[in-house]
Image: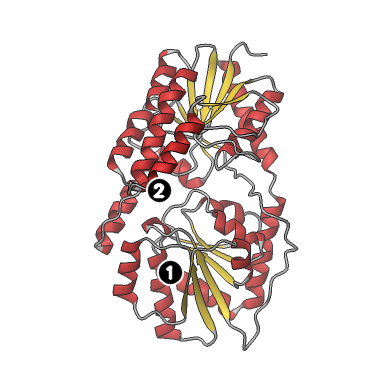
Amino acid sequence: MCAKKIQVISFQSLSANSGAGMARLGYFLSRELNKRGLLKNFIVHSKGKFETPFKSLPVSAFSRYYLFILNSIIKFLPIPNHKFRLLQEQLYDWFCYFRIQKDTGIIFTTNAYLKRTFRKAKKLGIFIVLMPGTPEENYIYDLVLEENQKLGITTVDSYTYKKRLHYFNQSIKHVDEVIGSMPTVYSSYSHSKAFNGNVVRILGHMSPDFPPNNGKTKIVNGGEVFTVGFLAYTVILKGLHYLVDAWQEIMNDDNPPNIKLRIGGSVDQPIMNYINSHFAPLKNVELAGPVSDVSNFMQGLDLFVVPSLIDGGPATALEAAHNSVPVIITDNCGSAELLSRGKGGCHVVSIKDAKAIKREILWAYNNRTAAADLGKTGKENLDNYDMDAYISQVADHLEQKIKNA
């Protein structure tokens, strides 16, 4: 047994029932490391009544209270989400600093915004491993900047807030190793100018916690409406404008009967303004607004499109596959790697390619049985994926690291 242990750190919280967000990854990895006698503890932002079979603790005894106060304040003050996010991250970093001790051999974290914590860890000789849920932030910033200039709009979010990007760059220089769990994460960190450490490719995903589904899907025949779906909280990175561009071309050039585009979720106002000014009037388009029942939304579709410029692992693509809905997805989305395994359970297109999206929509419309089979294959890929094997692979890598330390 190693003298020094591994400390797992998650910016997300443990709720009353489970881990939220990337805390799920931290939870399952901590459980596996604990079985091997390698876990020091699992640090989360806050911890409810959810008990773990290993040592887990909040970053601070006060975190539940300050998070409650912050969330109460933002209801009354017009603080932009990106500024609020950075404030939370800086507070987390401040308290996490005091959780770092010299008897730790490795810090494993899914959060890169830990400048103070990482700096202390390096002084103590602790090896830092980051497994980010999204591609490298400078890569994302450049994508958004280019798209803003192309569309002639200005958008600021968590990934394009310069103060937050600076915090990332000050943090990432202390990291020793990045694990690329998705192809774009691996490639963007491999080519990063801000990160000079080692990048390891260990592809894998967190299996979503969806309710059981019988896998049945409708095959639309002649006179029935063929419904294409999109669902997201839409910012510029979601690429909705490319889908709408493809849709307008379909309506103008092909004008197929009985076809509809259903757009779910809120749309950022600059994006909506751009769509209204460049593509109106939109023919055969339904704006469904916020969607509370995602499964019900998916079950009303015959095709689901994910046109994102970048997306770590869009859960909506997996939700569509879970409901056997065929998926068109860009190559910069992490979920594409999982769904396209084997004989392929989705169609992958390049980012910013409206013509490719148009081609795939028309293929699904004209080949409905084949499209339905694609959806079934996507569900099989999702159902047959072994998340435990992936967690073990990551744990194997960390175990080898700490043994060689």
The percent position of residue 17, horizontal first and vertical second, equals 66, 41
The percent position of residue 247, horizontal first and vertical second, equals 43, 76
Residue that carries the numbered disc 1 in the rendered image: 243
Query: Is 48 left, or right, of 61 in this rendering?
Result: right
Which sits in the foreground, 143 or 58? 58
Query: Which label number is shown at residue 44?
Result: none
At 59% from the left and 61% from the top, the residue drawn is 294
- Disc 2 versus disc 1: nearer the observer: 2
Query: Is 158 left, or right, of 303 in this rendering?
Result: left
Label 1 neighbour load within 10 Å: few <14, some 14-19, many 20+: many
Which sits in the foreground, 141 or 68? 68
At 38% from the left and 67% from the top, the residue drawn is 241
Q: Check disc 1 and give the amino acid type.
A: Leu
The percent position of residue 59, horizontal first and vertical second, equals 51, 26
Vertical placement of 254 versus 305: above or below?
below
Q: Check disc 2 and give the amino acid type.
A: Lys
Residue that carries the numbered disc 2 in the rendered image: 75
The percent position of residue 122, horizontal first and vertical second, equals 42, 17
Q: Earlier in the sequence, mark 2 or mark 1?
A: 2
How many marks the image carries: the answer is 2
Determine contact: label 2, label 1, CB under 8 Å. no
